[in-house]
Image (cartoon, rainbow, N blue to C red):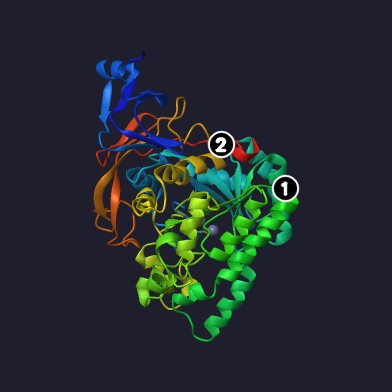
Amino acid sequence: MSDDLTVIVGGTVVNATGVFPADVIIEGRRIAALAHRDSALAQSVRSAGHRRIDATGKYVIPGGVDPHVHLQLPMTPEAMSADSFETGTRAAALGGTTTVIDFAGQLHGTNVRDAVDHRLAEAEGRCAIDYALHLSLGDIHDQSLKDMRMLVDEGLTSFKLFMAYPGAWYSDDGQILRAMQVAADTGAMIMMHAENGIAIDVLREQAAALGRTGSVWHGRTRPVELEGEATHRAIQLAAVAGAPLYIVHLSAAEALEQVAIARDRGRNVFAETCPQYLYLSLEEHLDQPGLDGIRHICSPPLRSRTQGHQRTLWSGLRSDDLSVVATDHCPFCDAEKRLGIDDFRAVPNGLGTIEHRMDLLHQGVVAGELTLPRWVELCSTTPARLFGLAGRKGVLAPGADADVVVYDPEATHTLGVATHHMNLDHSVWEGMEVRGQTSTVLSRGTVIVDEGRFVGRAGHGRYLQRDLPEPLR
Ligand code: URP
Ligand code: ZN
Ligand code: ZN
């Protein structure tokens, strides 16, 4: 037996496939074995004096995989998202996430190669946990379509397109179809921001002309019908192209209905939602005066609780019409949010949640909305599988990277700016009491969080070249 063994003893292992008492034996950077607590193997490893981490009374889960984050994103020339690769990945680790997937962005008039190289250079040496990149395509033409193929060969296997944000990231249906055809041909995943941006822009201008510039109008000018319509259109375009499709940050029952229909027809259509759409609402959070309201501006917007969107999304998580929970972490400090204090159209879009996703979804377990294996599946296993990391990340199994979280299900704590580690001067989660907390985190066999204290380092995290999404391999 190797000398370089760590054994996590006495815990309850939770994988997407089930829950059982086992010791986790780690050899170097990988998981070597899961040994039933009473087995001879567990006894012999325990008595051999290897490094031990006591997980008695705790869950032992695969590290979280957050497939949708925006670290140090220059949303506008004046507004950069607040967490750097260093602060954001440290906060993620403290919250039990061991892999993040961020985005390189190809803006109009720029080229794909430069966009990816620039983003890789920004992240290099700065991440506390492993990371990968998707590419946001903002300028689809012959060359960028060719470049998609080059990136797939390099292990960048997913591309985000936008039906929203005309004049910036928007692509028309013809451009979308062409990119989807390349995805169909290469096996890459198309990720879609599905809101009808052309119609939304009409509503925004009409609202502003009537002096309706408060934060709630951000929500009222992005109605659920226009998310449902765009989701339907994206699904049909993907069917024509024969491409797999992943709807990002799904917020509305109308959009979920379209995903459910497609999945019932056996299509390769998947969707993620985010904690903000499960917990926060248009009435209670977005429709507040001044700073309190604009802190909650994100796109798609928070949805109405009286219309029941949050309830519908929880049920979609159970039925697997929603396959993933990501954060869409894109926080802006108050100074940046205030740029739109008089006009919602000038507010940089996005909220900060990277540290809290595992805890917030664990509340779903506490409340009886989700089972323990489903929690792990939504937060770790399925995002790894859909983004080409199956077998390496998102699972506790022999041969997988030893990205392991020891999670205390009984610890209670209160979320908010006084305790969080995100580089953010407010929290949309302020005052929320949660049960369950990350205790110890290993990334490729190295302890990076020890009893709630960060002991890792910027630069430990490695860039992950990814396989093709699993449904297509
Ligand atoms: O409001 C959001 N979602 N900001 C991040 C950018 C995006 O569209 O994902
Ligand atoms: Zn988006
Ligand atoms: Zn996003």
Q: Callout 1, which amino acid?
A: Gly
Q: Callout 2, which amino acid?
A: Arg
Badge number at residue 242: 1
For the point 63% across and 73% down, the residue is 199
The residue identified by callout 2 is 466
* Residue sticking out furthest to the bottom: 210
Q: Quadrant of residue 289?
A: bottom left
Is residue 321 visible in the rendered image? The answer is: yes
Q: Quick one: label 2 or label 1, which is nearer the N terminus?
A: 1
Assess disc 2: are there few (<14), some (14-19) or many (≥20) residues with their C-alpha within 10 Å of its C-alpha. many
| In-image side of 122 versus 176 (left or right) | left
Identify the secondary structure beneath mark 1. Answer: loop
Residue 23 location in percent, x, y? 33, 27
What's the CA distance linking mark 2 and mark 1?
A: 21 Å
In this view of the protein, which residue sits in the foreground, 81 or 396?
A: 396
View quadrant of ligand 2: bottom right
For the point 33% across and 20% down, the residue is 39
For the point 66% across and 39% down, the residue is 150
Identify the secondary structure beneath mark 2. Answer: loop
